Structure formats: C-alpha cells, structure tokens
Amino acid sequence: MTAMLLDAPGRRLRRATLPVPAPQGHEILIKVGACAVCRTDLHIVDGELPPHLLPLIPGHEIAGRVAGAGPLAARFFLGQRVGVPWLGGSCGACDYCRAGRENLCEHAVFTGYDRHGGFAEYALADERYCFALPAAYDDAHAAPLLCAGLIGYRAYAMTGEAHRLGLYGFGAAAHLLAQLALREGRKVHAFTRPGDGRSQDFARSLGASWAGDAGTAPPVPLDAAILFAPAGELVPQALAATRKGGVVVCAGIHMSDIPSFPYSLLWGERCLRSVANLRRADGAAYFRKVAHGEVATSVTAYPLEAANAALDALRAGRIDGAAVLVPAQKEAMP
C-alpha cells in the first residue's frame, strides 16, 4: 500500500510502499476513503508535539470501509463505513477511565501519533473506538467530523448556555461548529488572523453575526469564547472580550505560551479552561446531532501523495474549511 511517512520532526513526509497491515484482536482493517488534515498533524510533523512513534503515518480523521477484522472484532461488518478519531485506545482501569473521563487516560493511545494513522491507503484501528458514519456524508465530507467536528463539539459543550459565542481561528473546527451553534439559536462572532478578509467573508457566508481581526473587540461582550488558533496571546484578548461569568475554552492540543495578563481580566468569575482529546460518548452525541447532514463540511481535496502540499496550505492559512487527503481508487484488496 502507499503511505506518507514522517521520519523525523521537521522533515517533509515521504511516499513509501508498505505491506497492508493485518488486524489483530479488536482491530479492524480500514480501506481509507479519505483522511482529513488536522492542525494536530501539523504540530506533530513540525515537532511542536514530542514524537511518540517514528517513522509514523500521521492522520487521525479517517473515513473508509471495513476491509478486514481481527478475531475479537465484531461491531462492524465487512464493507461498512466507519470513522476513526484521535482517541485510539484507553486502559479502562485508571482513575480517569473509571470516572468516565477516558479522554484523560494515563495510558491513552492516539491515532496518527502513538499508532499509524490514515495518510495511507489502509489503516488499522481498534473497533471499540470507531464510529459508524452517517450516510448523509461521503468519505471526504465525513472525515473532518472525526476531529474538527468532535473536538469543536466538546469545546462547545463547555460553554453551557452561552448565547453570544466567539470563535478564534476560523478553520476546520470553527466552520463546523458555527453551523451547529447557529442552528441552536446562538450568535457567532468569528475572529481571524489580522487582515484575513477571505476567512471573515467565509464566516459571514455561514451566518456569523460579526467577523473581524482577532485583536479587535467584538461589537458586544461575549458570553463565551473558544480558541481554535494555537496562539497563547489570544487568551488575554478573549478574556477581555468576554463578559463577567463567561468562559474561555482553549480547544487545541498545543498552544504557544500565554503571556502574563492582569487579574482583572479573569476576575468577575470568568473561567479559563482547556479541552483534552474526546470521549466516545462525545462522539456518539455529536453524530446524533449531525446524522442527517445538519452541518456542511467545506473541503479542499488533495491526492494522498500531495500530503505535504496540504500541510503547507494549512500552515499558511490558505484553507477555508478542511483539507482532505483522498487515496487513489484501486481495486479492493483480495
């Protein structure tokens, strides 16, 4: 099979031909239909997250069909469409797992980080951590739901009943979450890189009440803000834009250092918190909300072999919505 490999942080991915892996235990073999490109992939490739497995096939937003199963795998049938998220496994025994917080498991493994991911024609996944995909989405449009959608939804749940919602960084996650929030009667304010008129226009086209530069104060105080951009300097800005009693949620796995800021920005019972990974329960709840195509994924498709170009475009902020890698269609594995 063709796969795109990371040999060391900071290097370009290289195209490799590898054997199709054999599923063991609860694993299923997935013929990859599409794999979205996430900012977390950038953090791994660029070395902002320490390497866990090298060489590595990145990619953790996988949509495809079951092509094989290990001896203990029984959830899905051959040919069924499934999605693979970032959380690839948890121990089930630590304090976090026993408390229903498997996203914080001390021994969690992550797709495209601790185990090979979906920048390939085939991938293995533990079926217990996979999701059945809604028929309303083809593979390319379903793939971004597996992280941009899921992590955005978990962050959104932490904002409670916030009516005026600020989204900092209007990319893959924000464009999906904005649609869901609007459907539920919220007002969305979109914050982008300074001067990024294209992303601001994109946000308005989806129904945002206001869109502007991240350093600009919104026209009204926010009830809550979610930071998808990995820029620590946005934290004080988001706190300043949020009313007393509001919450600011940092939704990324990596962020640059947060500068010092006056206590007055936090005072007034504002809350600053982070989101870490996801629980399977979050995924089940999210897919119930979007089961009939309630959010439209805007995707830019790249051939699998153009993974470096997709990463470059994401790094430079040239993607509206999500970048998606699509392997060339070939005959099914015998």
Image (cartoon, rainbow, N blue to C red):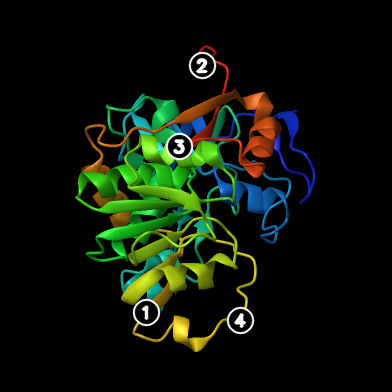
Q: Residues within 10 Å of mark 1 (few under 14, many from 20)?
A: some
Give the spatial CA distance, label 3 vs label 4. Answer: 32 Å
Place of residue 232 in the rendered image (x, y in percent of width and height, measured from the top left): 59, 67
Residue 158 percent coordinates (x, y): 32, 66
Quadrant housing residue 67: top left
Q: Label 1 sits on what residue type?
A: Arg
Give the residue pinned by disc 2. Answer: 334
What's the distance in space between the residues labelled 1 and 4, CA to CA?
Answer: 16 Å
The residue depicted at 39 percent of the width and 33 percent of the height is: 297
> What distance separates the C-alpha of mark 4 from that of mark 2?
59 Å
Residue at left 53%, top 36%? 198
- Residue 212, percent across and down? 48, 50
Looking at marks 1 and 3 on the same chain, the residue that comes earlier in the sequence is marked by 3
Inspect the image, locate mark 2, and give the three-letter code of the amino acid beneath it: Pro
Marks 2 and 3, how far apart at CA: 47 Å
Whether residue 274 is visible, yes or no, is no
Tag in front: 1 or 3: 3
**Foreground: 75 or 231?**
231
Given this view, does label 3 or label 4 mark the residue nearer the observer?
Answer: 3
Secondary structure beneath dot 3 equals helix
Secondary element at image label 2: loop
- Mark-to-mark CA distance, 2 and 1: 58 Å
Residue pointed to by mark 3:
201
Task: Give the mark, 2 or 1, whose residue is nearer the N terminus.
Answer: 1
Q: Residues within 10 Å of mark 4 (few under 14, many from 20)?
A: few
Earlier in the chain: of badge 3 and badge 4, it is 3
Query: Residue beneath label 1, please?
Result: 270
- Along the line of sight, which residue is nearer the eye, 250 or 207? 207
Graded by Cα atoms within 10 Å as few (under 14), some (14 to 19) or many (20 or more), the crowding at tag 2 reads: few
Quick one: label 3, few (<14), some, or many (20+) residues within 10 Å? Answer: some
